[in-house]
Amino acid sequence: MQPVCLITGASAGIGAALARVFAQHGHALALTARREAQLATLADEIAGSGHPRPQVISADLGTPNGPALLAEALRAAGCEPSIVVNNAGFGLLGEAADLDRAQQLAMIDLNIRALTDLSLRWLEPITRHRGGILNVASIAGFLPGPGMAVYHASKAYVLSFTEAMHEELKTDGVRVCALCPGPVDTEFFELAGLPDDYFPAFLKRSAERVARDGYQGFMDGHRVVVPGKPNRIMTLVPRLLPRGLMLAMTDWRRKRASRRG
């Protein structure tokens, strides 16, 4: 079986940028997302740059059998993951009581359940190849999230789970890292219903910058990577202020941004 770096949610944004960075550093890739046409275009681009063409597998990881079907497709292609990059996920803007309940549960299925499944499913080959797991979380995982309650909670889970896995697997030579970007100009904003100016501009980073920082931190064995100094400062603020004050400040900023939008 050929060892590959599996990247989920690879059809656009941070996932596509991570695919380019891993390919540039010589990793054989398997790319998955729901949109096969976009994956094929990215695979052609990577091959056109002189790197091996990635395996392309269309999969809906938010469905109960999505991870199992992905695993079957990888086996059929003669591949086994030595690195898993869990990037697939989505968010929704709005108060939890007002948002569609099924959509919020679907967010948990993809952001948490599928990520956990794929982090655990290939631990044997990951350990054998001394590879690793790179889970894309967010600075949202450090902060209370009125207005995006389920999204923030899901990323807090990803951060906590990843840090624990980092500690458990480091003696086996396995890298486990949480990549926690701030706002990134990708289609995530449109899908989540976020206005372009919802977050301060000084927190924003490009998908390419996030991918480069994430790859380097992962390969260096870091537990958590937060691209950009302003975002790193943001992750420290909750440790310095009372939780109730952080909630009030976050909710005030959210309401102010909504009125402005």
Image (spheres, rainbow, N blue to C red):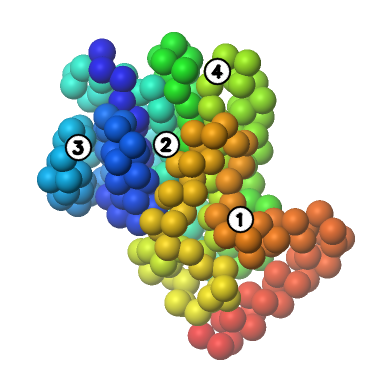
SS at badge 3 = loop
Quadrant of the drawing holding the N terminus: top left
Q: Which mark is residue 173?
A: 4
| Distance of label 4 from label 3 (alpha carbons) | 27 Å
Which of disc 3 and disc 4 is earlier in sequence?
3
Instruction: Name which quarter of the figure residue 65 lies in.
Output: top left
Which of disc 2 and disc 1 is earlier in sequence?
2
- State yes or no: discs 4 and 1 in contact (Cβ < 8 Å): no
Q: Is residue 75 above or below residue 53?
A: above
Is 73 placed left or right of 205 in the picture? left
Discs 2/3, front: 3
Q: Is residue 4 above or below residue 59?
A: above
SS at badge 4 = loop
* Residue with the mark numbered 2: 85
Amino acid type shown at disc 2: Val
SS at badge 2 = strand
| Distance of label 3 from label 1 (alpha carbons) | 32 Å
Amino acid type shown at disc 4: Gly
Q: Which mark is residue 139?
A: 1
